[in-house]
Amino acid sequence: MALIVQKYGGTSVGTIERIKHVARKIVATKQAGNDVVVVVSAMAGETNRLSGLARQVSESPDERECDVLLASGEQVSASLVSLAIKDLGQRARSFLGHQVRIETDSAYGRASIKSIDSTRILNALRSGEIVVVAGFQGVDEQGNITTLGRGGSDTSAVAMAAALGAGACEIYTDVEGVYTTDPSICPNARKLARISYEEMLELASTGAKVLQIRSVELAKKFSVPVHVRSTFADVVGTWLVEEDESMDSVMVSGVTYDKDEAKITVLKVPDRPGLAAQVFGSIAEAHIVVDMIIQNASEDGTTDLTFTVPKADYKNAIAIVQKIAPIIQAKGVTVDPDIAKVSIVGAGMRTHAGVAAKMFQILAREGINIEMISTSEIKISVVIDEKYAELAVRVLHEAFIEKQGVL
Ligand code: ASP
Ligand code: MG
């Protein structure tokens, strides 16, 4: 008997009708002879509604209490999905994070799973029940409720699949799988049949919204076979798999964009050891994650230091940098929130030369100026003016994916 973990996202359980639909799918999986563990998100919009309530009560609401509040969204859907399954004549049992015992660290709002005790789940499965677990939540060592960050139910599901050694982790969502780019920008985007964990990690880190980054990291670490697919159309989606040789021939698997970052430049930083450490040390202390960093070669003994941070942290980051700039004798700070990061990702970049050159040529042909560049073995990202993001995505997709990347 196979064990399947199925995760249903917010839109999949967004209404009572949809919850009943999901329950029928779950029961069909059980009746086909599988053990089923379901992980659910809060009903669509619920997590936003709850955090809105907290902000109405307090300007900077206490993080522990926020997690108690936010976790309630998943409690509601876990219960409703169990009820709907029972209504179809199957046995089901819901579990909250602390009842399973999904233990996390104590980083409220962005906790990491440390361990999962699968005893109660295995007992329930053994007695023939379908198990429904509230996603997105856990409990720390002291018994405080924690949440895993936005999109965290994906991570709950993959972690559960890893802990139980499930045959597959199916992520049911409102799209049919992972696409070569955002279909709302590029009508020629196509669904990928397979994608390597590593490529998916780069896609998720550069703006693809379909999976939480941490869930992909976990899937890669524990080789969990993940199948991203639609709740509403009964078609095969995208499988996340180990990279194999056939993938080398595809230079670019996906084109992504991210408008959620802002750019900060510290002007004329004296060229001395320790100054970059000072700037980024202070930013790190404020728990702000820096993405791209550029430092130019110095000519007159000073250098400009440019970097990007999430827009949400941008005001905070400016305040920090403005405080440090005079201390390190920099000439000033400039900021630009109207940027976009556009990236191409593909395992084939490991073995093909000239991909970056081609990307830059394509952007140049459209008159798009590149402000920053960063690369990994299988990714090239550029920062450009936000107003060209859609155009850049379309021309890159056309050149690298629709025409299958002839250099
Ligand atoms: N309900 C949470 C959110 O909206 C977690 C999730 O849906 O994965 O971010
Ligand atoms: Mg999601």
Image (cartoon, rainbow, N blue to C red):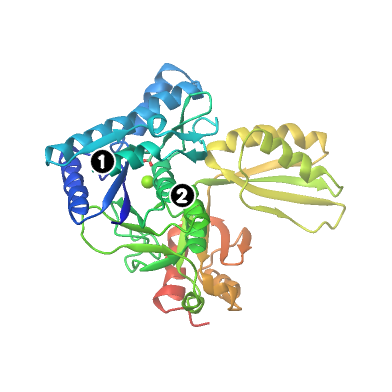
The kind of secondary structure element at disc 1 is loop
Which residue: 28% across, 37% down?
43
> Label 2 belongs to which residue?
215
Which residue: 29% across, 59% down?
176
Which marked residue is nearer to the observer: mark 1 or mark 2? 1
Residue 41 visible in the shown view = no
Where's residue 390, x and y in %?
Answer: 43, 59
Q: In front: 108, or 256?
A: 108
For this view, does 165 lie left or right of residue 374?
A: left
Q: Quadrant of residue 350?
A: bottom right
Residue 70 visible in the shown view = yes
> Label 1 belongs to which residue?
127
Which residue: 76% across, 57% down?
296
Quarter of the image that includes the N terminus: bottom left
Disc 1 to disc 2, C-alpha distance? 29 Å
Which residue: 61% across, 78% down?
353
Q: Residue furthest bottom?
A: 406
Mark toward the start of the polypeptide (1 vs 2): 1
- Callout 1 amino acid: Ser
Where is 209 relative to 76, above or below? below
